[in-house]
Structures are given as structure tokens and as C-alpha cells.
Amino acid sequence: MMILKLKQSKLFKNTFLYTLIQLINKGVPFLLLPILTRYLSTDDYGIIATYNTFIALLVIFIGLSMEGAVSVNFFQLEEEKFRKYVSNIFNLMIASTFLVTLVVIFFQELIISKFTIPVIWIYIAIAVALVQTITGINLTLWRSQQCAKPYAVYALSQTFFNIMISLLLIIGLNYQWEGRTAAIASVSIFFGLLSIIFIYKKGYAKFNYSVEYIKDALKFGIPLLPHQMALWMRSGVDILLIATIVGTSQSGIYSVGYTFGAVVGIFATAFNNAYSPYLFEKLKSLSEQSKIKIVKFTYLYFIGIILFAILLNGVFVLILPYYLGEKFQEASQYIIWIALAYSFQGMYLMVVNYIFYAKKTHFLSMITIFTSIFHVVLSYILIQNYGALGAAYASVISFLLTFVLVFRISYKVYAMPWILWRKNDNS
């Protein structure tokens, strides 16, 4: 009965649409693999992977987790106050972009040596990180308003142009790694500018100044910096360690295998995009019976996502010889480990929402500082002993550890009857 009601709900319909969009939009690297692995060398792919890693790092410090602040406050503030809140988030992003640029200028030579990219691409990356953050806020507003159709049109259009420009530059104009990075940059900037227009027309960019809202946004976002860094370190640092210890070519092959395994994460994120607004709304007033239903559904999700990871690995291993270029076939050994890691990441997303809702994000800092350091040390040791495969092993262990610790904290900050066999256990 619960499953039947779920199928008929707006949650299910939006989840299906968001899942489809995430598969296409976030799966652009996956969709391009048959071409990239035949037209680019493993070294080229390694450079692309490190460049994307650099952009992801910049997004953390420019964006300051403001998408999460927008999502939570959409349901907690009156409309006019929320408009002012979003406007002040833009004030913060302007300031953070300026500070990040100063830091990049100061460490320019070190960055060039570690990421093996020309200096011009470093500053293009800053612009890309900023506009990607703005686009993320625009999509968060649509998602919070449950406007799935404009969200879909926008996201799918971005994906289409990303693919087309990549094909034009790599196949038509015979560019190497520069073709892919130029496509990412140009499409991100164009759609970022579109997002500014949409946000302005919605009345969310009035450029007012409020110390109260800026403090609230910083109180939400700053404690999440270690948390976001931990997520980056579990893939970004691995790419850099593999490139340094094993070689750029191996980092390229590993990133291809990672792309396959991370498909589980695309599904998990897509579901959470639809589920988190639904959950935040429900948490305003929950009966004990409703809490039990949510817990049961969450446990079913845990089992389902692990089984999904195992099944997906089997499918990918079968199609890999036909999907990838010959020099990238070695990537198959990484898929199952990354898929399992992202199944634990999906489980983590289901429980971290309670911490976000309670605005107790400082607890995440303690967990992520520990797990990020743990992951880097473990990954370094395992890469030394098992090559690039060691990074995959480290991902499984650290993602599982993070889920377990966050699950425990979420239980403390927002009581749910997770122990179903104990009646009325809210301790």
C-alpha cells in the first residue's frame, strides 16, 4: 500500500524526472566515453580529470554550500525575506570569488605544477566555478518550488550543448584535452549567465545588504567546508595521488572506471534532489506513525541501492569491451569498488538531511575532518601497495565510515525511530 501511494505521489513523479535528468546531465562524461577513449590518449584524459578536479575544488570555496542554504531556507522563511536571503548569498559569492582569485594568484606556480595545466586555464576555471555555482542555485530554486519541467528543459539543454561542442572541438577541429575543457568552460559560462537572468526575473537578486542573512548563510556554509573538502578529497586527491605516484596515464584510466561506478551516485543524488524538499516539508510536523513509515522506506532504500550497485557493475563489465577504446579496457577493475562506495554515499544522503534541517552542520565538520584525513592517508598507503586500485579500496572504506558516523549524529540531532523493534524509542 505504501509503495502504491508513493508511485502516485508527486515525489515519485519528480524523482523519476530528476533521475532521468541527472543520468543525462551529470552523465555527460559517461556519454562521451566512446569518443573520448578513442580520440584522446590516456594522458589527455588524465589532464581532463585533473582539470575537472581543480574546478570542483574552486566550487567548494566560491559556492560555500549556498545551494543547501537556499534549499533549507526556502521552507523556513517568508517569501519576501527569502528573496533578500538569496540576494545576500550573491553578495557572499562575489566576495568569495575575489578572495579565491587572490589565493590562486599567490599560489599560481604551485597550482600549475600540480595540475599540469597552462596558466590561462587556471583563471578560466575560476570563472567556470562561479557560474556553475550560480546555475546550481537557479536549479535549487526550481527544485524547491517543485518546478520539474523548467528544471528539465534547462538541464537537458546544457547537456546537449556540452556534448555537441565537445564533439565539434575534438572530432571536427582535432583538439586534444583542450577541446573537452573548452566545451565545459563555454557551456558553463553561457548557462551561468542565463541563470543570472532567470534569478533576477524571479526577484531573487535585488542586491540589498543584510548582516543578519550573511551571518546565517555563513553559519550554514562555513562548517560545511571540511565536509565538502572531504567529498572532494575522496576523488580529487586520489586523481592527484595516482598521477603523482603511478602516472598521468593511470589517472586517466582510473577516472574512466570511476565514471562508470559513479553512475550509482548520479541515481542517489537525483533521488535526494526530489526527496530532500519533500522530507524538509514533512519534518515540520510528523506523527510517530509517519516517522516509522519514513524509517521503513529508508531501510528499503539502503538495501535497494547496494543491490543496484552490484547489478550495475555486472552490466557495465559486459558492455565495456564495446563501449571503450582498447587502451582504456583496464578501467573495468575499478567499477565495482566505486559503485559500492557510491551506494554508501547514497545511504549517507538519506540521513544527512536531518542534520541539515536541524542546522547542526558543525557536527559534520568533526566527522569530515577525521574521515578526510583518514582517506588521504589510507589512499596514499594503498596506492603505494596496490597502484590505482588502492584508491578504489580507500573509497569504499572511507564512504562506509562516513555513512556510519553521520547516521549516528543524525539520530542525535533529530530523533527518528531507527530501531523499529523498540517501541517509542526517541532517545
Image (cartoon, rainbow, N blue to C red):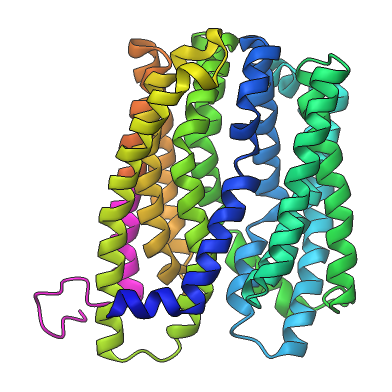
Which quadrant would residue 249 be assigned to in this image? top right
Q: Which residues are magenta?
A: 401-427
Front in this rendered view, residue 390 or 41: 41
At 86% across and 73% down in the image, what residue appears? 205
Above/below status of 49 relative to 308: above
| Quadrant where the image shows the C terminus | bottom left
At 29% across and 47% down in the image, what residue appears? 306
Does 158 appear in magenta?
A: no
Using residue 374 as the reference point, say whether residue 221 is left or right of it.
Answer: right
Residue 359, x across and y down, in percent: 50, 73
Residue 408, x across and y down, in percent: 28, 62
Using residue 170 as the reference point, say whether residue 296 is left or right of it.
Answer: left
Q: Taking the image as drawn, is residue 102 in sight?
A: no
Above/below status of 301 relative to 208: above
Which quadrant would residue 100 be assigned to in this image? top right
Front in this rendered view, residue 247 or 373: 247
Using residue 85 as the reference point, say whether residue 360 is left or right of it.
Answer: left
